[in-house]
Image: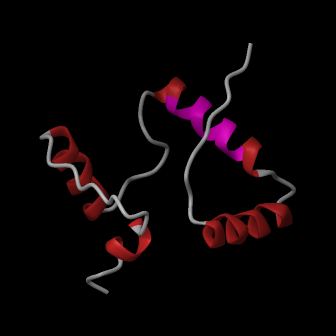
Amino acid sequence: MTAVVKAHVDEQTVKQAEAVLRTMGLSTSVVVNLLIERIAKDKALPFQPNVETVEAIEAARRGELVTVLDGRLIESLNEDD
């Protein structure tokens, strides 16, 4: 049996990733499947997250989540840039 996995990802980022994956002969679906299988097997991410990601994960675990209600998540994340 299979499950459907949905993710909200910036459209331009998806297009860029798909272009790269096509040159490797891979689809987005195959790569997501590989990632999920690796996480399940190793019980860890198959890469080392950067400092900002680690801090965000820790903040989320403490219940300090940032919520963006107007749908402009990417803009809110890039405010400090």
Q: Position of residue 38 (x, y in %)?
A: 57, 33
On whether residue 32 falls in the magenta region, the answer is: yes
Work out which residue is located at the far top of the displayed protein and give it.
Answer: 1
Tell whether 70 sits left or right of 34: left
Q: Which residues are magenta?
A: 31-39
Tell whether 19 sits left or right of 42: right
Quarter of the image for residue 56 reads bottom left
Q: How many marks?
A: 0
Name the foreground residue: 33 vs 14.
14
Image quadrant containing the C terminus: bottom left
Most frequent secondary structure within the magenta stretch: helix
Name the foreground residue: 24 vs 80.
80
The way the protein has been coloured in the rendering is: secondary structure
Q: Position of residue 28 (x, y in %)?
A: 74, 51
Work out which residue is located at the far bottom of the displayed protein and give it.
Answer: 81
Which residue: 78% across, 69% down?
19
Tell whether 18 sits left or right of 40: right
Picture layout, residue 29 above or below residue 44: below
Which residue: 84% across, 67% down?
23
Name the foreground residue: 57 vs 64.
64
On whether residue 77 falls in the magenta region, the answer is: no
Image quadrant containing the N terminus: top right
Work out which residue is located at the far front of the displayed protein and give it.
Answer: 70
Picture layout, residue 66 above or below residue 63: below
Which residue: 46% across, 50% down?
47
Tell whether 6 sits left or right of 57: right
Picture layout, residue 40 above or below residue 13: above
Q: Position of residue 11 (x, y in %)?
A: 64, 67
Which residue: 57% across, 65% down?
10
Quarter of the image for residue 18 reads bottom right
